[in-house]
């Protein structure tokens, strides 16, 4: 495995990399409740980034509805002119940051990066950081698969996570710094949209390279936003079969002196719909994906380390899959890096609420766009899913106001990034949507096929109580995929309310036969252009994964691969 030139192990933001940084994961002072005045007197500690509900945190207790408080002393060593940024990759749900006793920043939302420029609050030497977090069991809060009742894992909802649940880190930048780099590719051309901060006038030098070939673009600018474009002769295109990545170095200079330097990477990859077919780099592509909820046994939604993220991508590739739908979670960005590096399509999905009011709608939209902006530079990302199965928008089928809200989110997503598919409401009751996606957990493959010819799929199948489109909407010729199906479990695993979909199987032979019959049944449908099987791993009481929570396969990986690639659309099924 050949890493990009920007790669630094454990670096949390792999597409905007600086050499000078410090991980703040590890031991912090901790208290349940609001303890910002005396958190350093607390005799409790927590192992960040693991949330207190899970054992690796060192606590393993449920947080009550309300506050938790974190504290840590840090040593700052900055040069003259440097700025200091503090990054929280994920904090659930309302976070208030205090540095050396002074309020520094506030963030609302659990699933997007929270960053603060703390330069003016810190001095060389020891400094104190205090984070006060408010979380709740409110169903209207963006919560994904987190349950909303303590001690009650309801069907497909799991033990919640409170407070810090992703990495925390410190970074030093120049006085004039790069805030973001967004590559936009078309053919052999690439334009980088660059956001900067801290200088009225500056120059940029951007170098793109792969192997021995390099390309340079330069410019001088007097606004925070800049663009640089270049053409790469005979550009190698990114795909799961050939995940070609190009390295990027961006240097900032002010008055001829270096002010900042960052490293990144990107891939040339075009995805589109050609009628009812999906094309990648101008060629038809059949999607063979898996639902991935990103839970890691006793660690919950927090990965134990970077190796665990890489291992999941490697397993999916070994299974013969070419994509994953990350379900109801925004994953650690290092996972996206390995999808880019190893070649795995990824669908980005917004964790759901379970009810809205007007304020919640604004918070939802704000956080979703932050998530889209964090994902849009990764070539692996090919689709956005703002809503799933009408969760939080329960009356969408006939309610015009809710339909308008969903359409507004779809339009906002496309305005932010118009280069990917946007699925309005994955599973059923679509409004304006680039793809028609269907969820169906029928376990009898023959019945599945009978229930879904083309007309039944785009109008209404007797196998599903929910219609594919809302009132006033209908099929417009777009690609059709089954994005949840399968979910088979073993009888031996169904204990203490553990469950899978439909009738469970007795042994590995029956499991293999069920898996093969369902995947190959979907591939027999001529109008279908892809599928997403449920699911990669068991998750707490939901025991319908191809792997256990410990990542042990329930069938040999080689046998799963043969099934995945052996259908009508699979590689082994082609002449």
Image: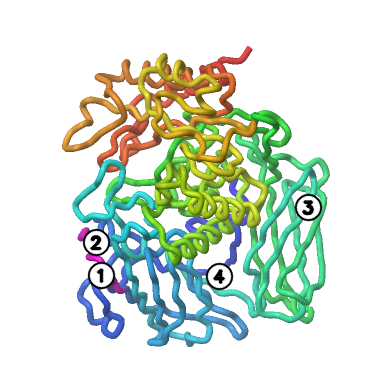
Q: From the image, tell me which residue sits under label 4.
A: 20
Q: How far apart are the two marked residues, 4 and 1, measured between alpha carbons?
A: 27 Å
Query: For this rendering, which residue is in front, 189 or 568?
Result: 568
Query: Does the image show residue 22?
Result: no
Query: For this rendering, which residue is in front, 458 or 371?
Result: 458
| Left/right of residue 173 with respect to residue 324 in the rendered view | right
Of the numbered discs 1 and 3, the one sitting upstream in the chain is 1
| Left/right of residue 139 with respect to residue 328 in the rendered view | left
Magenta span: chief secondary structure: loop
- The label number, if any, that marks residue 214 in the structure image: 3
Of the numbered discs 4 and 3, the one sitting upstream in the chain is 4
Determine the secondary structure under disc 3.
strand
Q: Quadrant of the C terminus?
A: top right
Q: From the image, tell me which residue sits under label 1.
A: 45
Q: How far apart are the two marked residues, 2 and 3, measured between alpha carbons?
A: 48 Å
x, y percent for residue 224: 71, 73
Determine the secondary structure under disc 2.
loop
Work out whether 570 lies above or below 192: above
Q: Residue at x 64, y 37 (%)?
A: 239
Q: How far apart are the two marked residues, 1 and 3, measured between alpha carbons?
A: 49 Å
Of the numbered discs 4 and 1, the one sitting upstream in the chain is 4
């Amino acid at each position: 495995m050949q890493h990009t030139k920007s790669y630094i192990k454990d670096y949390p933001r792999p597409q905007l990399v600086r050499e000078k940084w410090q991980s703040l994961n590890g031991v912090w002072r901790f208290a349940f409740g609001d303890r910002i005045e005396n958190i350093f007197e607390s005799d409790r500690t927590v192992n960040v980034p693991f949330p207190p509900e899970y054992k690796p945190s060192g606590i393993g207790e449920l947080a009550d509805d309300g506050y938790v408080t974190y504290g840590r002393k840090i040593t700052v060593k900055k040069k003259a002119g440097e700025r200091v940024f503090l990054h929280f990759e994920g904090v659930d749900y309302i976070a208030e940051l205090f540095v050396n006793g002074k309020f520094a920043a506030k963030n609302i939302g659990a699933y997007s990066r929270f960053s603060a420029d703390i330069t003016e609050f810190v001095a060389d030497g020891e400094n104190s950081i205090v984070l006060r977090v408010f979380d709740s069991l409110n169903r209207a809060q963006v919560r994904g698969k987190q349950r909303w009742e303590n001690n009650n894992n309801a069907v497909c909802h799991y033990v919640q996570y409170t407070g810090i649940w992703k990495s925390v880190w410190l970074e030093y930048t120049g006085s004039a710094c790069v805030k973001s780099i967004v590559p936009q590719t078309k053919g052999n051309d690439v334009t980088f949209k660059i956001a900067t901060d801290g200088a009225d006038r500056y120059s940029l030098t951007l170098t793109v390279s792969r192997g021995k070939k390099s390309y340079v673009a330069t410019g001088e600018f007097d606004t925070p936003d800049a663009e640089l474009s270049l053409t790469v002769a005979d550009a190698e295109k990114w795909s799961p079969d050939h995940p070609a990545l190009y390295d990027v170095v961006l240097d900032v200079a002010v008055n001829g002196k270096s002010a900042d330097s960052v490293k990144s990477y990107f891939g040339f990859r075009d995805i589109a719909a050609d009628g009812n077919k999906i094309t990648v780099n101008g060629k038809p592509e059949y999607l063979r994906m898996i639902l991935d909820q990103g839970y890691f046994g006793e660690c919950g939604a927090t990965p134990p380390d970077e190796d665990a993220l890489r291992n999941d991508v490697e397993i999916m590739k070994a299974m013969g899959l070419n994509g994953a739908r990350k379900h109801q979670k925004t994953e650690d960005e290092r996972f996206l890096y390995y999808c880019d590096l190893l070649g795995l399509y990824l669908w980005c999905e917004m964790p759901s609420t379970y009810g809205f009011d007007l304020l919640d709608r604004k918070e939802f939209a704000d956080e979703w766009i932050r998530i889209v902006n964090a994902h849009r530079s990764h070539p692996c990302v090919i689709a956005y899913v703002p809503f799933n199965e009408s969760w939080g928008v329960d009356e969408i089928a006939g309610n015009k106001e809710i339909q308008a809200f969903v359409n507004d989110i779809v339009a906002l997503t496309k305005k932010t990034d118009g280069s990917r598919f946007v699925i309005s409401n994955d599973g059923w009751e679509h409004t304006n949507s680039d793809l028609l996606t269907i969820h169906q957990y029928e376990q009898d493959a023959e019945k599945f096929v009978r229930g879904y010819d083309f007309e039944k799929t785009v109008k209404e199948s007797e196998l599903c109580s929910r219609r594919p489109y809302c009132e006033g909407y209908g099929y417009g010729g777009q690609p059709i995929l089954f994005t949840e199906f399968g979910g088979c479990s073993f009888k031996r695993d169904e204990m203490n309310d553990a469950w899978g979909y439909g009738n469970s199987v007795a042994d590995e032979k029956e499991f293999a036969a069920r898996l093969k019959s369902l995947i190959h049944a979907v591939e027999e449908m001529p109008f279908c252009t892809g599928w997403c099987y449920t699911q990669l791993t068991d998750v707490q009481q939901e025991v319908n994964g191809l792997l256990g929570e410990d990542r042990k396969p329930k069938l040999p990986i080689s046998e799963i691969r043969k099934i995945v690639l052996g259908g009508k659309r699979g590689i082994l099924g082609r002449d």
